[in-house]
Image (tube, helix red, strand yellow):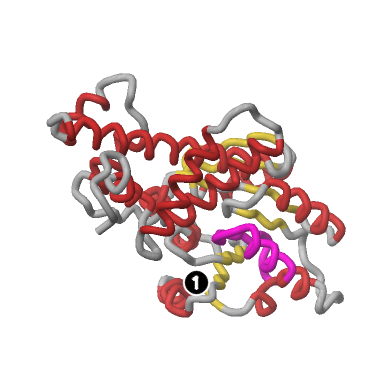
């Protein structure tokens, strides 16, 4: 008998991840506030319904949600549903938070869930929509070694690179710093390419040279060719979500009194961009924002 999985958060990342679980033979119960996403999962073979309808039918619940605030709210809803009918017997439940949450919130949630005898790990992912679709995400997990081993087969249905990075909260810590680096690379690359263009070095040629040199990064190797140079700006990951992740990293540096201003500077630019660009803008559109200040070309068009 295949394991049953609850999947909460069927967005651009969550929906293809839930579909991959169905492809691998898992029985998936999905929930999202977007009825269209619920219908799509159901048409693909998944079950849909409110959390209280299926919470006792699953061995794992995966969360793929936009923020810690929403994760905290959903966990309380799960607890309310889970304790409503106490006479129902259920094998030990594990909740896996694959969102980009604050590590401090994750540790608090772990203590709460432990009191209810529910296992909890954080296992955020990296790789974007493309890798969510083909099941080749990188997964960075925080929790005990035993919890990681228990969840490893399930996580392996979603990702190709699985890492146990430390105790609870370590996965979310790792994800925040990874996304801070990604944002920093992207911002620096946009400024560099636009400056080179001002000196009449063609952007495509500049990217080609950089990608054969030591200045290359994920931004120059993947984001520029696929989303920026062609002005498609459709990576599937929003500017607001990356801004949130950079703000989280900024807070983590501040909590350790780290002697650096770089996180603040990067956050400042992404925060300004989120106020200038259209709501729902793709994170690669930071390149469009850079053009408004780098060479003083004027207001954003």
**Residue 15 magenta:** no
The x, y position of residue 107, in whole percent, is: 76, 48
Residue sitting at x 68%, y 71%: 57
- Farthest residue to the top: give it: 214
**Residue 63 magenta:** yes
* Left or right, residue 223 beside residue 59: left
Quadrant location, the N terminus: bottom right
Residue sitting at x 66%, y 66%: 58
User: 70 and 256: which one is in front?
Assistant: 256
Residue 234 against residue 218 in the figure, above or below: below
The x, y position of residue 163, in whole percent, is: 58, 36
Residue sitting at x 39%, y 53%: 129
Q: Would you call the spot at circle 1 few (<14 residues within 10 Å), some (14-19), or many (20 or more)?
A: some
Image quadrant in which you'd find residue 277:
bottom left
User: 292 and 157: which one is in front?
Assistant: 292
* Left or right, residue 91 beside residue 40: right
Quadrant location, the C terminus: bottom left
Residue sitting at x 71%, y 33%: 256
Instruction: Quickly name the residue at label 1.
Output: 46
* Left or right, residue 201 beside residue 166: left
Q: Give the residues drawn in magenta, as a range.
A: 56-76
The x, y position of residue 267, in whole percent, is: 50, 44
Image quadrant in which you'd find residue 13:
bottom left
Circle 1: element type: loop
Residue 122 against residue 81 in the figure, above or below: above
The x, y position of residue 123, in whole percent, is: 61, 47
User: 54 and 251: which one is in front?
Assistant: 251
User: 18 and 187: which one is in front?
Assistant: 187
**How many numbered dots are placed on residues in this image?**
1
């Amino acid at each position: 008998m295949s394991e049953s999985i609850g999947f909460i958060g069927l967005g651009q990342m969550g929906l293809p991840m839930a579909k991959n679980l169905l492809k691998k033979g898992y029985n998936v119960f999905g929930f999202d506030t977007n009825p269209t996403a619920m219908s799509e999962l159901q048409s693909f073979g998944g079950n849909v319904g409110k959390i209280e309808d299926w919470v006792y039918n699953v061995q794992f619940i995966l969360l793929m949600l936009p923020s810690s605030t929403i994760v905290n709210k959903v966990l309380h809803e799960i607890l309310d549903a889970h304790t409503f009918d106490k006479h129902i017997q259920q094998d030990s439940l594990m909740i896996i938070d694959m969102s980009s949450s604050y590590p401090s919130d994750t540790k608090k949630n772990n203590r709460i869930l432990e009191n209810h005898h529910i296992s909890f790990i954080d296992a955020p992912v990296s790789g974007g929509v493309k890798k969510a679709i083909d099941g080749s995400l990188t997964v960075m997990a925080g929790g005990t070694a035993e919890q990681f081993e228990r969840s490893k087969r399930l996580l392996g249905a979603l990702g190709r690179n699985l890492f146990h990075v430390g105790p609870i909260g370590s996965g979310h810590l790792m994800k925040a710093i990874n996304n801070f680096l990604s944002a920093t690379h992207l911002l620096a690359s946009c400024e560099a390419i636009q400056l080179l263009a001002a000196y009449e070095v063609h952007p495509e040629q500049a990217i080609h040279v950089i990608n054969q040199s030591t200045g290359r990064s994920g931004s120059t190797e993947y984001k520029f060719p696929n989303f920026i140079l062609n002005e498609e700006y459709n990576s599937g990951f929003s500017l607001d979500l990356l801004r949130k992740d950079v703000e989280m990293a900024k807070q983590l540096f501040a909590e350790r009194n780290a002697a650096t201003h770089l996180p603040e500077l990067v956050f400042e630019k992404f925060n300004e961009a989120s106020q200038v660009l259209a709501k729902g803008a793709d994170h690669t559109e930071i390149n469009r924002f850079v053009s408004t200040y780098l060479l003083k070309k004027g207001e954003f068009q």
